[in-house]
Image (cartoon, rainbow, N blue to C red):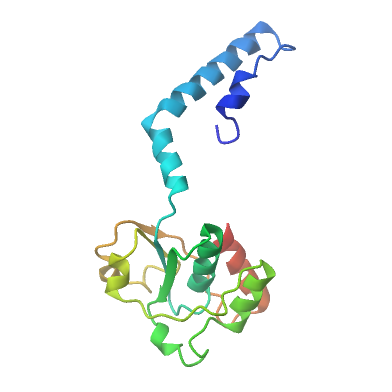
Amino acid sequence: FARFDLADARYCSCPNLPSANNVICKKLRNSLIEFQKSEEYNRSIKDRMIMKKTLFISGANIARSQMAEGYYNYLAGKNLAISAGVEADKYFEKFNGHPTPEAIEVMKEDGVNISKQMVKQLQKEMINKVDRVVVLCSEKTCPQELLEGAKETVYAHVSDPYLQPIEKVREARNEIRE
């Protein structure tokens, strides 16, 4: 039903098809009408219309989570996402508190500027201020006790592009974008 809405269904008379196909078309139209009246459909519309405050977590907060934050805020049109790293303090000085130059470069290729974003150490309070936590690093890197109290946690492991060739950074970016 993703690409077929009620307007399509109203005009789906299938005049050139045998009557059996018209019956299928009517059943499809009726199923769609019922689905659009359902609580599940209304909930999914609401979820798509209301972007959730999201925290993206990675190991260092210098590439993956920064790219995810950049995309989310770019697509939302406002700052609803933040990112943080489990070990961000170790990398803060190395990049003057910003994402890696490679992460900044590959995001610019997609028209998203993350050069002003800052590296942030994960704090327990951050988890309490968001609706969703997305963990981009391995579960070993992000201990469960750090995530206690999260309203919703999603694990979406993306390979760490740190110290990798620019092609690997692009691959990580593409995986995050999808």
Q: Residue, x 60% and y 35% (percent of image)? A: 3
Q: Quadrant of residue 67?
A: bottom right
| Direction from residue 136 to residue 20 in the image, left or right | right
Residue occupying the point 39% across, 60% down: 53
> Toward the viewer: 139 or 2?
2
Is residue 111 placed above or below 40 in the rendered structure? below
Q: Which residue is farthest right? A: 16
Give residue 160's position: percent from left, percent from top. 52, 74
Outermost front residue: 78
Residue at 37% in and 67% down:
139
Residue at (56, 26) in percent of width and height: 6
Q: Residue furthest top?
A: 19
Q: Residue 124: percent from the left, percent from the top?
A: 28, 73
- Is 78 situated left or right of 89 in this image? right
User: Which part of the image, by quadrant, shows the N terminus?
Assistant: top right
Residue 170 in the image, given as x and y percentages of width and height? 64, 70
**Number of labelled discs?**
0
- Against 162, residue 140 (above or below) is above
Q: Position of residue 9 (x, y in %)?
A: 59, 22
